[in-house]
Amino acid sequence: MAFCPNCGKEISLNSAFCSSCGSDLKGTKKGPAPASSQKKTTATEKTGLDALDVKTYMIISTAGLGAVALLAIMMKDSVGFIVCAALCGALYFWGVKKLEEGDGATAKRTSLIVGIIGGVIGLAVLLAGHFTGAVTILVVIPAFLAWYKLEQKN
């Protein structure tokens, strides 16, 4: 049995590329998988929600804020639309895009700021008697989760 040196998945001896991660296997030693990568894969597969990464949390929150912005415009709430659309744009361009560029510090700050602003505004709207406040609070929770995951990495 041979294993990919990059991801630890089982591969055939004459494979040129790993079918799991796409790693180039030409000229690499195909041997047993390191014990640490086998444990990581098993732990990740069992956790379910923990398998979501930071970028996924940010995208979920961005999509949620976009949906709340559309809901606000349908309810003729222009202020709610502007606020949610601005938070959505900030989280996407200063969160997701910066994370893709390797700027984890900006992504972490953006996730926290969007989460706090969205939560405070959501609470104020909820206390004013509008259900969209509760929805706003729910959709910024993944932004907090992204911040928390980035905080754990440091």
Image (cartoon, rainbow, N blue to C red):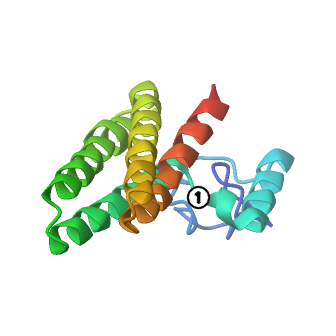
The residue furthest front is 128
Where is residue 20 drawn, in percent x and y? 58, 66
Residue beneath disc 1: 52
Give, as a three-letter code, the residue at label 1: Leu
Question: In the figure, 19 relative to 79: above or below?
Answer: below
Residue at 43 percent of width and 29 percent of height: 109
Residue at 43 percent of width and 59 percent of height: 126
**Residue 60 visible (yes or no):** no
Residue at 52 percent of width and 53 percent of height: 141
| Left/right of residue 29 with respect to residue 133 in the rendered view | right
Residue at 46 percent of width and 63 percent of height: 134
Label 1 crowd bin: few (<14), some (14–19), many (20+), radius 10 Å? few
| Left/right of residue 74 with respect to residue 130 in the rendered view | left
Where is residue 108 drawn, in percent x and y? 47, 32
Residue 139 found in image quarter: bottom left
Where is residue 64 drawn, in percent x and y? 37, 63
Q: Which is more toward the observer, 152 or 101? A: 152
Q: Which is more toward the observer, 110 or 119? A: 119
Report the quarter where the C terminus lies: top right
Mark 1 lies on a secondary structure that is loop
Q: Which is more toward the observer, 127 or 84? A: 127
Residue 125 found in image quarter: bottom left
Question: In the figure, 23 relative to 117: above or below?
Answer: below
